Image (cartoon, coloured by chain):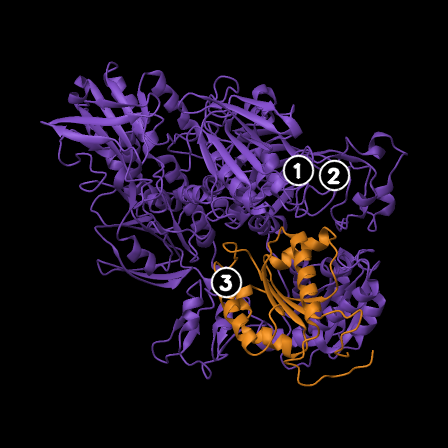
Chain colours: A orange, B purple
C-alpha cells in the first residue's frame, strides 16, 4: 500500500493486548457494541510483560504506523507483576525511541481492565487520532513496497 | 453402612458457593451447584472494585465463574431452588425445582438480537433498578452461563400468548422455547453446603435517611453500580436526579447495622467501613473535575482486616474527610441537594450540604433463606444468621449440612472464600471414601504425530448467525483463506460452536488429515477450550490451534464499515494462519504427587489442618519447634462466645496424638526445602528428610510486649500491669485476687495502629471487652474503664460491646495526639486521659491495668518464607497469592498458610482458615499427578550468557541458574508461561513455546502484508 497521507488515510496500528485484562476489555467493547475505527490489529499475548522492545520495534519495522501495548491495571496482573515490568520497560523504550527519532505518540501504553469495554474503544480512538496526526511512519521502514489493491 | 455418595450439593452461586464447588470438584467429588437467578456470580459480580487492592471485581471473578461453568464435574443448575432435603450425612435426597428459562442454552449464542428487538423494558435488578433491561435479558455482560433468559413476569408473549413473540422470530439459532415448563428433580448427594449470602439492608423504613423520598440518596450497592463501567451510567458517576456529576458526596455509616433502635440489627456488618472508604477513593478517581469532596460520617472506623488500616491511612492522605458523627436527619435542599444535620463532638448542631448521599447499608439474611433454614431445621442465631460454633465454624446444627460466606455472619470476600474452602473440607472430608466414585473423566484417542508433515491447515469461518455475516462478507473471507500458504481446507459455518458443526469439524480433521486448525469466530477467551477439545477428539494435539476474533473485535465494533471489517477479518485470518504454521505440539505436562503433607507449626491452626487431612486418609508430618503441642492457645482463656479454650485444646491434642496418619516431629524446625508442588523434599533440623506433595505453613505469631518505648505504660515495672494473655492466665488459674479489685482499666491499641506497626490487630477489642465482662462476672461492683481509639467488635461481636455498655463499663476514647499518661505513684497505678466528650482530663486509679497489645509476626518467619519462596507483607506477615480470592494459597503452588502467620485473627477464623488450607491441600493430594502449564519458557543454553536477569523477573521462581553449567534452567512444573523472562532476556536465549519472538513477529508481519 502506498505510504502517502491522503484525505482518508487510516493509520495501521498493532496492539499487543494481555490475555487477562485488555484483550477481555476489547471483547467487552464488542459485546457492548462500542464502535471504534478499524485501524488496529490485535495480537494476543499472555501478559504485557511478554512484550519486549524487540516486538515493538519489529512492528514498526514491518510497517506499522503505531503500536499499542495494553495490560492489566497495576495490582491486577494475572502473573503478579508482569504489567509493572512492561511499564518500566516502556518508560525506558520511550526515551530510546525518541533518541532514534521516532516521534512520541507512535508507541503507546495503557491499562485497560476486563470490565472497561468503553475505555478500550476510547483508547483505540485516541491512539488512532494521535498516530493519524503524526502521519505514516517511515523511520524504520527500509523498503516501501507498493502492492496494487 | 453403605459407602456414602460421592457428590455434594452447593446452594448459592456467589463467590463462596463457586469456590466451594471448585474445591470439591477438583478433589474428587461431583457437585450440583444450584443458583436462584439466571447466572452465577452473586453480589460480587455487582461490585465495581474490591478493597483493599482496588482490583476490578469482574476481572478477578470471571475466570472462576468460567471455570465453574465449564467444569466437567460441576452440574450448574441456574434458575433453580431447593425445596427439601431428606436423610443424613452420606445419604441425602434433595428435591429441586428448576424454573423455566424459555431459552435453550444449547442453542443460544448470546448474540443479543432478541433483547434488541424485545419491546418490553423493565427495571434491571442487577443495577438495583437504576437502569433498565428487556424482558429477555442477560443478567450481566460477563454472565455465566452466557445465555439469555426470559423474565416470565415481564414477557408480553408469556402473559398474552399470540402477542409479540419477536424474540422467537429474530433468534438466528431457534433458541426461544415458550413452552418451557418448571421441572422438579431429586438429587442424591452425600453432603450439602449452603452459601446463600446476604441481601443489602433496605433503608426505606428509616425515614430520617430520606431514602426513596429524595432522589439523590442512594444505597451503597446502588452507588457501586453507578461507579461500575458496566453499570447504568457506564462508570461516569452521575447522580440520579439530573445526571450531573456530584461534587460533594457523603457516606453515612451503620445504616441498618449497630442499630437496635429502628433497624433491629444489633450486629455490625463488618464490611461497610471498608467499602465506604473504597467507594470514596474510587469516586475521587472517577471525578472528572478532580475536586470531589468525599466525607464519611462514622461511629467507629472498623478497618480490622489485612491491609485495611493502610488503606484508611492512604484515604486520609488523599483528602477523604472522616467525620465522627451519627447523622440524624437528611433534609432536602435546593437543586435536589441534601442537607445533613448532625451534632459534632462538641455537641453543636451542624447543617452541611451535599450533592449526593450514600447510605452504607448493612448486610442481612434474605427472608427466603430464613424460611429455607426453618424448613431444613437449621438453627439460626438471634440475628437470623446461621448459628455456628467457634470450634466448628462452618458446620450447622444439622449434620452433613455446612455453610460458608455471609449466611453465618456478615463478612468480606476473603473470609467468605476461606470459609468456602473450609466448608468444602468438611463436606468432602466426610465423604472421602467415595472420592472419584461419581466424577466423570474425559478420554481422548491417541494423538497423531505431525512432526514430519508439512502444514495442512484447515480454516473454519463462522457466520455466528448474522452476528458476523451481517457485517463481514464471510464467503469472501473463506475464499481468501483457502489461498493462504499451507491452507488445504476452508469452510464457512453458520454456527461453528454448535454440536453438529463440532462433530463435523472432528470428521474433517481426520478426513483431510489436517494438522493445524484456525477458527475465525468469536473470542478465544470463551471458545478456545471447546475447539481445542475438538482437536483432541480428532486425534491431534490441542496446541496446533489458533483463533481469529472476527466477531467481538471486528464485526461488532465496526458495524458501520462493512468493507473495512471484511478486510480486517482477512488480516486476522492471515495472522492466525501465519501463527499456527509455526505452532508445535506441546506436552500435557503433569507432575506426579507424593501423597503426603508437611504441616509446620502445631498450634490450633497446624493441628486442625493436620487432622483434617489425616482423617481423610492422607499421611501428615506435623513439625513443631517446641516440645509441646498447642501453641498460643494454651495461654488463651475463652473465645468471645464464652467457650473455654482448654477443653477444646485438650481434646484436639488427644486426637492429633492418637491419629496413626500423623507423624509428630516435636522440638524440630525446617532446615532446607527443595522441589515444587507434588514433589517437595524437606530436611528437618533433626536430620530427617521428608518427601511431601504439599506444605501448610501455620507458624503463628507473637504477642507484643512493650517492655520499653512509648507504649510501655509501666509494663514489666508494676506487677499489676498485664497483657491480655497474661490476664487470661490468671483467669485460667482461677486467681482469687481478681475478685477483690475495685477498679480496672484497659488500654487498647498498645503497639497497634501506630507508626512502627500500622496495622490493626483485629482481635484485641473483642478480647479486651470479653475480659472486662469476665471481671464484671467475678465482681459486679468493679469499675472498669476502657481507653480505646475505635471499638472494632465486628460482626456478631458487637453484641458483646453492647453488653459491656449495659453493664456500666466506661469507654473513653483517646487518639494518637492525646495519649493516656500512666505513672507509678508509690506502687499504685495512676492514669490520666482526656475525655473528649466532656473535654476534661480524667484521672483513674486502677488496681489492674491491662494492655491490649498488638499481635506481631514472628521474627523467624522470613527464613521460612525464603525456603518456600513465599512473599511477606511489609509488616512481616506471610503474603497470600491473592488478597481477595486466594486467601490460603501462596503464589508458590502446593504451599498454603493458616492462622496468625497470615494475619491476627480469632480462633474461629483460624480454624476456618486451617480447614481451608486442608481443602486446598487435598486438591493436590487426592490426585496421582497434577497438571502443569504446557506453554512454558525454554532456555537455549547455546545463547544463554548466565546473566540471571530471568531468575529475578520470574514471579514464580521457576527459572534458576544451574550451578554446574552457569546457564538458566526452567522448571516446567513451576512455569506459568507469562513470558516475563523472554522479554527480559538480553541474549534472546529464552523463548516461550508457541509464543516465541518468531511466532509473534510472524503474526505482526502477516498483519502488515497486504494492509
Residue B868 falls left or right of residue B785:
right
| Camera-side residue of B506 and B888 | B888
Which element is circle 1 on? helix
User: Would you say the residues marked 1 and 2 are in contact, meaning their CB atoms lie under 8 Å apart?
Assistant: yes
Counting from the top left corner in percent of width and height, residue B574 is at 73, 73
**Secondary-structure class at tag 2:** strand
Q: Which residue is mark 2?
A: B133
The answer to which of B602 and B427 lies nearer the viewer is B602
Residue B571 in percent (x, y) is at 74, 71
Report helix, strand or loop for mark 3: helix
Within 10 angstroms of label 1, few (less than 14), some, or many (20 or more) residues? many
Which residue is drawn at the image coordinates 72% and 60% (left, top)? B553
Q: Quadrant of residue B480?
A: bottom right
The quadrant in which residue B551 appears is: bottom right
Q: Quadrant of the N terminus of chain A?
A: bottom right
Give the residue number, with chain letter if any, for mark 1.
B126
Q: Is residue B534 left or right of residue B644?
A: right
In the figure, is residue B170 to the left or right of A35? right
Which quadrant of the view contains residue B759? Answer: top left
- As measured in the structure, the alpha-carbon distance from the residue carrying label 1 to the one carrying label 2 is 9 Å
* Quadrant for the C terminus of chain A in the image: bottom right
Q: Are marks 3 and 2 on the same chain?
A: no
Disc 3 to disc 2, C-alpha distance: 38 Å
> Eyeballing the image, is B371 above or below A80?
above
Chain for mark 2? B
Q: Is residue B260 above or below residue B490?
A: above
Q: Residue B194, labelled with which disc?
A: none
Residue labelled with disc 3: A82
Amino acid at each position: 500500500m502506498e505510504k502517502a497521507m491522503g484525505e482518508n488515510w487510516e493509520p495501521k496500528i498493532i496492539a499487543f493486548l494481555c490475555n487477562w485484562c485488555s484483550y477481555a476489555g476489547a471483547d467487552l467493547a464488542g459485546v457492548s457494541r462500542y464502535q471504534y475505527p478499524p485501524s488496529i490489529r490485535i495480537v494476543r499475548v499472555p501478559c504485557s510483560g511478554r512484550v519486549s522492545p524487540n516486538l515493538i520495534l519489529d512492528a514498526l519495522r514491518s510497517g506499522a504506523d503505531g503500536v499499542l501495548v495494553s495490560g492489566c491495571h497495576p495490582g491486577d496482573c494475572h502473573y503478579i507483576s508482569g504489567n509493572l515490568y512492561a511499564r518500566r520497560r516502556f518508560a525506558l523504550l520511550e526515551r530510546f525511541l525518541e533518541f532514534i527519532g521516532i516521534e512520541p505518540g507512535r508507541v503507546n501504553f495503557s491499562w485497560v481492565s476486563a470490565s472497561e469495554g468503553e475505555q478500550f474503544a476510547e483508547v483505540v480512538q485516541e491512539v488512532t487520532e494521535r498516530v493519524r496526526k503524526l502521519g505514516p511512519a517511515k523511520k524504520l521502514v527500509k523498503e516501501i513496497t507498493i502492492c496494487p489493491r | 453402612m453403605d459407602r456414602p455418595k460421592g457428590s455434594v450439593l452447593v446452594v448459592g452461586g456467589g463467590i463462596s458457593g463457586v469456590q466451594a464447588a471448585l474445591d470439591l470438584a477438583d478433589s474428587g467429588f461431583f457437585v450440583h451447584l444450584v443458583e436462584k437467578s439466571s447466572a452465577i456470580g452473586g453480589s460480587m459480580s455487582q461490585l465495581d472494585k474490591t478493597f483493599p487492592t482496588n482490583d476490578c471485581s469482574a476481572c478477578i471473578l470471571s475466570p472462576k465463574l468460567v471455570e465453574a461453568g465449564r467444569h466437567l464435574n460441576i452440574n450448574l443448575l441456574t434458575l433453580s431452588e431447593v425445596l427439601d432435603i431428606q436423610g443424613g450425612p452420606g445419604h441425602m435426597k434433595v428435591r429441586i425445582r428448576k424454573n423455566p428459562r424459555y431459552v435453550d442454552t444449547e442453542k443460544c449464542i448470546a448474540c443479543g438480537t432478541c433483547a434488541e428487538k424485545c419491546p418490553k423494558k423493565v427495571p434491571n435488578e442487577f443495577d438495583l433498578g437504576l437502569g433498565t433491561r428487556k424482558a429477555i435479558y442477560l443478567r450481566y455482560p460477563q454472565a455465566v452461563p452466557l445465555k439469555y433468559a426470559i423474565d416470565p413476569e415481564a414477557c408480553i408473549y408469556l402473559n398474552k400468548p399470540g402477542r409479540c413473540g419477536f424474540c422467537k422470530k429474530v433468534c438466528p439459532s431457534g433458541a426461544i422455547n415458550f413452552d418451557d415448563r418448571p421441572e422438579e428433580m431429586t438429587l442424591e448427594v452425600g453432603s450439602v453446603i449452603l452459601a446463600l449470602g446476604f441481601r443489602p439492608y433496605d433503608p426505606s423504613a428509616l425515614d430520617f435517611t430520606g431514602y426513596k423520598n429524595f432522589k439523590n440518596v442512594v444505597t451503597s450497592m446502588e452507588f457501586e453500580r453507578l461507579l461500575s463501567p458496566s453499570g447504568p451510567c457506564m462508570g461516569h458517576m452521575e447522580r440520579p436526579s439530573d445526571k450531573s456529576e456530584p461534587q460533594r458526596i457523603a457516606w453515612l455509616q451503620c445504616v441498618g447495622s449497630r442499630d437496635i433502635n429502628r433497624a433491629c440489627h444489633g450486629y455490625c456488618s463488618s464490611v461497610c467501613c471498608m467499602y465506604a472508604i473504597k467507594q470514596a477513593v474510587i469516586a475521587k478517581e472517577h471525578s472528572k473535575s478532580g475536586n470531589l469532596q468525599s466525607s464519611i460520617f462514622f461511629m467507629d472506623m472498623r478497618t480490622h482486616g489485612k491491609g485495611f488500616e493502610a488503606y484508611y491511612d492512604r484515604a486520609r492522605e488523599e483528602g477523604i474527610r472522616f467525620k465522627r458523627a451519627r447523622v440524624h436527619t437528611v433534609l432536602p435542599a435546593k437543586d435536589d441537594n441534601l442537607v445533613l444535620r448532625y451534632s459534632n463532638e462538641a455537641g453543636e448542631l451542624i447543617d452541611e450540604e451535599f450533592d449526593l448521599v450514600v447510605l452504607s447499608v448493612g448486610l442481612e439474611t434474605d427472608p427466603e433463606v430464613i424460611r429455607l433454614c426453618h424448613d431444613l431445621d437449621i438453627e439460626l442465631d438471634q440475628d437470623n444468621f446461621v448459628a455456628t460454633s467457634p470450634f466448628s465454624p462452618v458446620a450447622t446444627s444439622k449434620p452433613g449440612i455446612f455453610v460458608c460466606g455471609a449466611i453465618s455472619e456478615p463478612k468480606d470476600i476473603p473470609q467468605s472464600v476461606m470459609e468456602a474452602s473450609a466448608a468444602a473440607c468438611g463436606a468432602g472430608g466426610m465423604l472421602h471414601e467415595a472420592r472419584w466414585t461419581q466424577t466423570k473423566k474425559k478420554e481422548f484417542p491417541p494423538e497423531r504425530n505431525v512432526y514430519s508433515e508439512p502444514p495442512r491447515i484447515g480454516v473454519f469461518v463462522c457466520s455466528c448467525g448474522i452476528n458476523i455475516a451481517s457485517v463481514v462478507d464471510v464467503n469472501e473471507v473463506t475464499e481468501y483463506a483457502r489461498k493462504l500458504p499451507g491452507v488445504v481446507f476452508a469452510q464457512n459455518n453458520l454456527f461453528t460452536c454448535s454440536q453438529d458443526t463440532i462433530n463435523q469439524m472432528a470428521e474433517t480433521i481426520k478426513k483431510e488429515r489436517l494438522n493445524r486448525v484456525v477458527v475465525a469466530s468469536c473470542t478465544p477467551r470463551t471458545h478456545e477450550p471447546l475447539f481445542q477439545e475438538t482437536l483432541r477428539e480428532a486425534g491431534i494435539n490441542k496446541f496446533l490451534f489458533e483463533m481469529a476474533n472476527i466477531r467481538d473485535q471486528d464485526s461488532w465494533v465496526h458495524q458501520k464499515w462493512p468493507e473495512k471489517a471484511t478486510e480486517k477479518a482477512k488480516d486476522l485470518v492471515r495472522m492466525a494462519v501465519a501463527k499456527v504454521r509455526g505452532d508445535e505440539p506441546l506436552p500435557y505436562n503433569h507432575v506426579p504427587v507424593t501423597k503426603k503433607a508437611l504441616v509446620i507449626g502445631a498450634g490450633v491452626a497446624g493441628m486442625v489442618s493436620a487432622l483434617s487431612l489425616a482423617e481423610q486418609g492422607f499421611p501428615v508430618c506435623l513439625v513443631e519447634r517446641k516440645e509441646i503441642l498447642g501453641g498460643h492457645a494454651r495461654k488463651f482463656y475463652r473465645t468471645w462466645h464464652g467457650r473455654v479454650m482448654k477443653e477444646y485444646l485438650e481434646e484436639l491434642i488427644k486426637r492429633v496424638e492418637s491419629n496413626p496418619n500423623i507423624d509428630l516431629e516435636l522440638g524440630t524446625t525446617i532446615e532446607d526445602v527443595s522441589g515444587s508442588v507434588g514433589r517437595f523434599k524437606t530436611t528437618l533440623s533433626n536430620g530427617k528428610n521428608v518427601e511431601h506433595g504439599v506444605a501448610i505453613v501455620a507458624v503463628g505469631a507473637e504477642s507484643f510486649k512493650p517492655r520499653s518505648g512509648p507504649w510501655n505504660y509501666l509494663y514489666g515495672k508494676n506487677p499489676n500491669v498485664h497483657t491480655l494473655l497474661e490476664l487470661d492466665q490468671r483467669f485460667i488459674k482461677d486467681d482469687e485476687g481478681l475478685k477483690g479489685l475495685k477498679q480496672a482499666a484497659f488500654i487498647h491499641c498498645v503497639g497497634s495502629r501506630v507508626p512502627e506497626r500500622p496495622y490493626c490487630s483485629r482481635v484485641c477489642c473483642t478480647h479486651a471487652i470479653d475480659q472486662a465482662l469476665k471481671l464484671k462476672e467475678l465482681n459486679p461492683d468493679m469499675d472498669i474503664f476502657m481507653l480505646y481509639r475505635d471499638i472494632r467488635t465486628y460482626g456478631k461481636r458487637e453484641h458483646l460491646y453492647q453488653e459491656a455498655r449495659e453493664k456500666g463499663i466506661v469507654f473513653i476514647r483517646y487518639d494518637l495526639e492525646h495519649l493516656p499518661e500512666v505513672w507509678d505513684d508509690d506502687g499504685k497505678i495512676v492514669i490520666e486521659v482526656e475525655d473528649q466528650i466532656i473535654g476534661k482530663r480524667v484521672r483513674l486509679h486502677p488496681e489492674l491495668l491491662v494492655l491490649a497489645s498488638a499481635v506481631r509476626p514472628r521474627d523467624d518467619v522470613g527464613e521460612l518464607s525464603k525456603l518456600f519462596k513465599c512473599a511477606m507483607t511489609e509488616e512481616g506477615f506471610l503474603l497470600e497469592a491473592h488478597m481477595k480470592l486466594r486467601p490460603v494459597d501462596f503464589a508458590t503452588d502446593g504451599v498454603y498458610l493458616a492462622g496468625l502467620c497470615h494475619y491476627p485473627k480469632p480462633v474461629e477464623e483460624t480454624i476456618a482458615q486451617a480447614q481451608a488450607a486442608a481443602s486446598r491441600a487435598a486438591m493436590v493430594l487426592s490426585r496421582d499427578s497434577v497438571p502443569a502449564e504446557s506453554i512454558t519458557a525454554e532456555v537455549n543454553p547455546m545463547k544463554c550468557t548466565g546473566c540471571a536477569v530471568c531468575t529475578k523477573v520470574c514471579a514464580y521462581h521457576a527459572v534458576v541458574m544451574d550451578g554446574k553449567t552457569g546457564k538458566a534452567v526452567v522448571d516446567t512444573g513451576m512455569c506459568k508461561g507469562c513470558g516475563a523472562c523472554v522479554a527480559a532476556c538480553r541474549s534472546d536465549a529464552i523463548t516461550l513455546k508457541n509464543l516465541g519472538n518468531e511466532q509473534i513477529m510472524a503474526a505482526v508481519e502477516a498483519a502488515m502484508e497486504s494492509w
